[in-house]
Amino acid sequence: MAAKRTDSKGRILLTGESQRQDGRYAYKYTNVHGESKFIYSWKLNPTDPIPKGKRQCKSLREMKKELLRDEMDGIDSSKKKMTVCELYEKQNSLKPNVRKGTLNGRNQLMNLLKADKFGSMCIENIKPSDAKEWALRMSKKDYAFQTINNYKRSLKASFYTAVNDDLIRKNPFNWKLTDILTDDTKHKEVLTKEQTDKLLEFVKNDAVYNRYYNEVVVLLNTGLRISELCGLTVNDLDFENGFINVNHQLLRDKDGYYVDVPKTESGLRKIPMLAVTRKALQEQLQKSKGKCAIAVDGYSDFIFLNARNYPMYAVLYNNALNGLVKKHNKMYKDYEFPHISPHVLRHTFCTNMANARMTPNNLQYIMGHKNITMTLGYYTHASCESAMTEMLSIVA
């Protein structure tokens, strides 16, 4: 009968267990793929002391129990050492054909993960507290609540992939960001009729900002996204039938201009021209006719141009409106404008149409929203004035 194997302390070693010359314990096992693997520890049992100068670790027999538990639960232990960055990369590889903007967003999150210790952690070790600490670190780096929430949603989806692939048991992102951070997101403002009138009057008469008058008029009367406005060309305007054809958007990043499809499939639409919209577009055509300096991805004759006759893009309009508001409020301290952006103008149009009792389906179509919930719940605002008008019309 063969003698039983023992460790340096005379304790009997079980099947698969061994002790190396340096004192470290090892356990040999076969994974689900039939491959021979080893796990190591400086301790055989949980109560063993750690050798001087060595890091704290789980005992070999604790690790063996986890392996057995993984095997019974169908968890693939061979891939539990995958890092958060590797998991996020794997998740993205499952859906490779995305828009350039989505790809840029993925790269931003990946760079954040690589720069933070969270990205190099093994997914098997991630606890909800680790995920929450990561979110808190992002907040301390001045990332906005909504940005962190978007990143959290992406990571939650990645960890669901790991759960479904039997790599881990639980998703460490199953919690609400409001549990640890205050939602300080500023809700989008809606301009009142008085503010809208004063804005149009100021832009029209100001020597610097009057060049943006037509854009402000069009945005307030169409609900176009700013990238859709920037992408408008001569061929997109159907004056005969009174429609603006929206089938693309113009964007610009560090690599330059590029044309993309609208933000959603519902973005493909025809927006009716009101008389004021028609007039503004016709005036703009006269200003820009034949002046566009470049073509972008096969599109040319863009209508809205900067001083160098290159197409306008979102950042330029945001900067212009910020400067406009700053100048107005400096001149008229008794009547200051709130924050105004292209999206505020789109938001104002949608709210005005809703308060004018446009049917939800028609408003959803004009706005290019993917679902009706967006139109009803996110973009429309009630007020005491609109409620009074509607009540009076009902009882009349």
Image: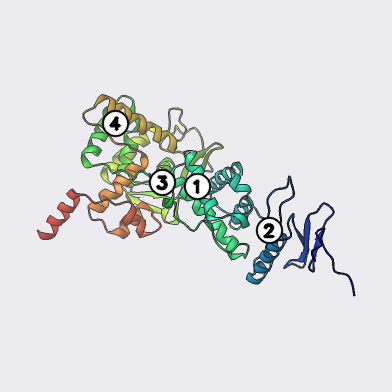
Q: Which of disc 1 and disc 4 is earlier in sequence?
A: 1
The residue where tag 1 is placed is 135
In the image shown, does 215 or 388 lie closer to the viewer? 388
- Gap between marks 1 and 3 measured at Cα: 44 Å
**Mark 4, residue position:** 203
Residue appearing at x 38%, y 31% in the figure: 320
Measured in 3D between alpha carbons, the distance from the residue under mark 2 to the one under mark 3, in whole angstroms, is 76 Å
Instruction: Give the spatial CA distance, label 4 vs label 3.
Output: 26 Å
Q: Position of residue 120 (x, y in %)?
A: 63, 48
The percent position of residue 125, horizontal first and vertical second, equals 61, 55
Q: Which residue is mark 2?
A: 47
Q: Can you identify the residue that label 3 sits on?
A: 236
Q: Identity of the amino acid at label 4? A: Val
- Between 169 and 88, which is closer to the camera in this rendering? 169
Which x, y percent locates residue 369?
38, 55
**What is the CA distance from the residue labelled 4 to the residue labelled 1?**
42 Å
Question: Can the viewer see residue 210 in this picture?
Answer: no
Counting residues from the start of the chain, the first of labels 1 and 2 encountered is 2
Q: Residues within 10 Å of mark 2 (few under 14, many from 20)?
A: few
Residue sitting nearer the eye, 211 or 86: 86
> Farthest residue in the right direction?
1
Q: Are marks 4 and 1 in contact (CB under 8 Å)?
A: no
Q: How busy is the neighbourhood of tag 1: few (under 14 within 10 Å), some, or many (20 plus)?
A: many
Q: Residue furthest left?
A: 396
- SS at circle 1: helix
Q: Amino acid at mark 2?
A: Thr
Which color scheme did the rendering employ for the protein? rainbow
Q: In what element is the residue under mark 3?
A: helix
SS of the residue at dot 4?
helix
